[in-house]
Image (cartoon, rainbow, N blue to C red):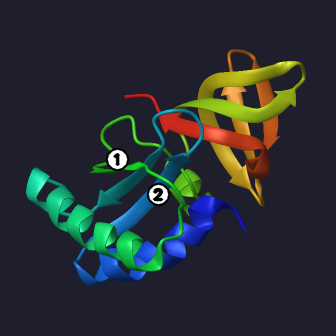
Amino acid sequence: MQRSEELKLLFEPVVEALGYVLWGIETSLQGKDPVIRLFIDSDDGIGVSACTEVSHHVGAILDVEDPISGEYRLEVSSPGIDRPLFTLEQFQKYQGHQLKLRLRRPFEDRRKFTGQLVKVDGDELVIQEGEYEYILPIQLIEKANLIA
């Protein structure tokens, strides 16, 4: 299980109990500035007070459970207009939209793709980039964002 999935199991019940959706988690725990970044969402939007509330509760969980050794910075924010996509369901919701993708390893000698998400087919994404269509397994995707 990836680190983000482990953290999601810890945080999601608390975030949902506060009335928000845990949209996704990014971790960058290597290097000199380690970060745990949570994206939260709600039908009413996300303001600073929601981020502060979630940060307080998640910080308490991190203090008690101590799933990360060493120091790190916790950030909580809205997914925003160029929202990152994490799950198959999120990709399905945004079919027809423009995306920017970065892959974990090269596909046809490339790691970066920008194009329209034509469809989600099983666990693969069909991306239209110019006149070409690419079928990319979701497991290859390191980072994906909508283009506003």
Residue located at (28% from left, 49% from top):
77
Q: Amino acid at mark 1?
A: Pro
| Residues tagged 1 and 2 counted as in contact (Cβ below 8 A) | yes
Asked whether residue 120 is in view, the answer is yes
Q: Please, is residue 115 above or below residue 11 in the view?
A: above
Residue located at (53% from left, 77% from top):
9
Assess disc 2: are there few (<14), some (14-19) or many (≥20) residues with their C-alpha within 10 Å of its C-alpha. Answer: many
Q: Please, is residue 7 above or below residue 97 in the view?
A: below
Within the image, what quadrant is residue 136 found in? top right
Left or right of 117, for residue 50: left
Q: Secondary structure at mark 1?
A: loop
Looking at the picture, tell me which residue is in the foreground, 66 or 132: 66
Q: Position of residue 56 (x, y in %)?
A: 21, 67
Residue located at (60% from left, 40% from top):
30
Q: Amino acid at mark 2?
A: Gly
Q: Position of residue 25 (x, y in %)?
A: 48, 55
Asked whether residue 42 is in view, the answer is no
Question: How many numbered discs, if any?
Answer: 2
Assess disc 1: are there few (<14), some (14-19) or many (≥20) residues with their C-alpha within 10 Å of its C-alpha. Answer: some
Q: Quadrant of the N terminus?
A: bottom right
Looking at the picture, tell me which residue is in the foreground, 148 or 49: 49
Q: Secondary structure at mark 2?
A: strand
Where is mark 1, residue-wise?
79
Q: Which residue of the protein is positioned furthest toward the front in this rendering?
A: 70
Left or right of 86, for residue 55: left
Where is mark 2, residue-wise?
24
